[in-house]
Image (cartoon, rainbow, N blue to C red):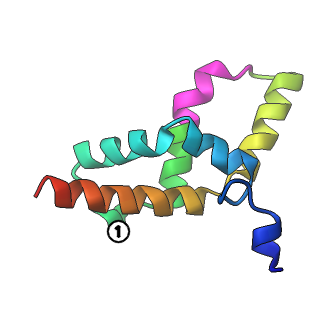
Amino acid sequence: MNKKRELSYNGWTNFETWTVSVWDYIPYFVDSAYDQELKPEDIDSGSIEDEFRDLVDSDIPNSGIISDLVNLSLSKIDWREIAEHVREGLEEKIMDNY
């Protein structure tokens, strides 16, 4: 059994990455990219992570145990996997609206 499969959660890299998908952030990112007239190749993991952190930043305390736990979870998200799904979703949205 390969290591990637052992570490997966519902087909995603891990629980933290799956959670981003299950809370519908991928469609949000797709819509955001489409509204900005971005191309799929313009989507990168760093910009997706930055946008997500901007969205949730006001909900995270500046310090304390909650901040530490949230930041630990955020550091485990596979942003490359999220970006890949956003690129695929954006390609589909562009084709559907072409």
**Which residue, as the protein is rendered here, is positioned at the far bottom?**
1
Q: Residue at x 14, y 52 (%)?
A: 97
Picture quarter with the C terminus: bottom left
| Residue 49 x/y as whole percent | 56, 48
Label 1 crowd bin: few (<14), some (14–19), many (20+), radius 10 Å: few
Apparent side of residue 97 relative to residue 14 in the rendered image (left or right): left
- Whether residue 38 is visible, yes or no, is no
**Quick check: can you spot residue 14?**
yes
**Is residue 59 in the magenta section?**
yes
Residue 3 pos. (x, y %): 82, 75
Q: Residue 63, located in which quarter of the rendered image?
A: top right
Q: Is residue 84 above or below residue 96?
A: below
Q: Quadrant of residue 74?
A: top right
Q: Residue at x 28, y 59 (%)?
A: 92
Q: Which residues are magenta?
A: 53-61
Q: Quadrant of residue 56?
A: top right
- What's the residue at 18%, 55% (across, down)? 96
Residue 44: say if magenta.
no
Give coordinates of residue 67: x percent, y percent.
Answer: 80, 27
Q: Which residue is mark 1?
A: 41
The amino acid at mark 1 is Glu
Image-based side of 41 in relation to 56, left or right? left
Q: Characterize the magenta stretch by its predominant secondary structure.
A: helix
The secondary element bearing badge 1 is classed as helix
Quadrant of image for the N terminus:
bottom right
x, y percent for residue 53: 58, 37
Q: Is residue 54 left or right of residue 70?
A: left
Q: Looking at this view, is 80 or 26 the one in front?
A: 26
Going 52% across and 30% down the picture, which residue do you hit? 55
